[in-house]
Image (cartoon, rainbow, N blue to C red):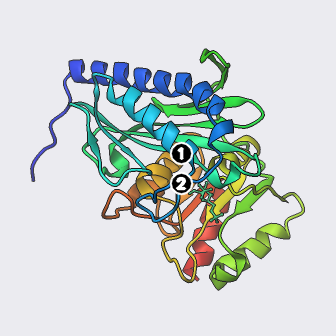
Amino acid sequence: MATEEKPTSTETASNETTITQILDVVARAAPEIRAGLPGRRIYAEQNNPSGETPMEADIYADEMLCERLGDLDGVGEYASEERQEVIDTGSGLSVCVDPLDGSSNLKPNNTLGTILAVYDAPLPAAGSDMVAAAYVLYGATTTMITAYDDTVTEYVVQDDGEYEAVREDVTLPEDPSVYGFGGRVPEWIDSFTEYVREVESDPSMKLRYGGSMIGDVNQVLTYGGIFAYPTLTDHPEGKLRVQFEGYPVGYILETASGRSSDGEQSLMDVEKDGLHARTPVYVGNEELVERLEAALDD
Ligand code: FDP
């Protein structure tokens, strides 16, 4: 069996520098993306690789991040949900971006996010290649959650792009209190529906669902609980994309001492062909995700 070559200490150091630069670019772009939203709440005249029609704001955020992240010396590949192909930007780490997650929330003016995944491998990469992940949440304030170096940190991002840590070593609260489940209820499979009814019947649990994954996941990270975009009868792989949503959200929640699953295994172990492949996503407190896996297995 071939032994994997270990990175040299210089490579590790330069990866660390690049990751810091990547997170800095995303944080500093966030207020600009936010400021660009008001005039871009209309559909663009094109479809994305998943067959959805993006908003003009999706394209705007994608172009800004592609240019700025691609300009970094240590970034070798850029991919986004809005592009069919991977962009070659030189040599170094690979970045995957969902520039504006939850963009159907633009019209009703609800929360949106930007999701970032950094891989030390060519794209599409495996979950085990992930070296950092982050998301920006455009809510009442702009915040950024990063998972890097085995720790999760929450930052508040100011309008001028300055950002400061407001919570370090973020972990899921031990007493979960919220749940949010996506997809049309009639399309849920029976075992999932039974699990949901059980969660709902727990008097300590409340529904928190807005239809923007990052907003819903951040509820879980803040209050403890479970988020799912499950397998559906007509769409067994659900809706969310492995490289852009499943891996980074799984990585963040697991780094925060939670669990992630595709129904059978950690999201980080999911193997799917193709840059735009989808997966069911279940993330939250360990006990809730384990009970869910057991329910789906019945
Ligand atoms: P959106 O289509 O608005 O961009 O994957 C994107 C996403 O939102 C998630 O943020 C969200 O959880 C999910 O899709 C909601 O999809 P449906 O409303 O189609 O169920």
Residue lying farthest to the front in this orientation: 45
Q: Which mark is residue 58?
A: 1
Question: x%, y% of residue 169?
Answer: 61, 29
Question: x%, y% of residue 246?
Answer: 49, 54
Distance, label 1 to label 2, CA atoms, is 6 Å
From the image, which quarter does the C terminus lie in?
bottom right
Labelled pair 1, 2 in contact (Cβ < 8 Å): yes
Question: x%, y% of residue 91?
Answer: 21, 31
Q: Nearer the viewer, residue 251 or 91?
A: 91
Name the residue at 73% across, 37% down: 139
- Above-or-below relation of 136 to 196: above
Question: x%, y% of residue 201?
Answer: 85, 70
Q: Which amino acid, mark 2?
A: Pro
Q: Name the side, left or right, on which 4 lies relative to 99.
A: left
Q: Nearer the viewer, residue 179 or 201?
A: 179
Q: Which mark is residue 183?
A: none
Q: Name the side, left or right, on which 30 lies relative to 2.
A: right
Residue 198 sits in quarter: bottom right
Mark 2 close to ligand 1, CB under 8 Å: no
Determine if residue 254 is in view.
no
Instruction: Name the residue that disc number 2 marks.
Output: 54
- Above-or-below relation of 55 to 39: below
How many numbered tags mark residues here? 2
Q: Quadrant of ligand 1?
A: bottom right
Q: Nearer the viewer, residue 276 or 54?
A: 54
Q: Which amino acid, mark 1?
A: Asp
Label 2 environment density (alpha carbons within 10 Å; few <14, some 14–19, many ≥20): many
- Above-or-below relation of 91 to 18: below
Tell me the element at label 1. Answer: helix
Q: Name the side, left or right, on which 71 lies relative to 40.
A: left
Tell me the element at label 2. Answer: loop
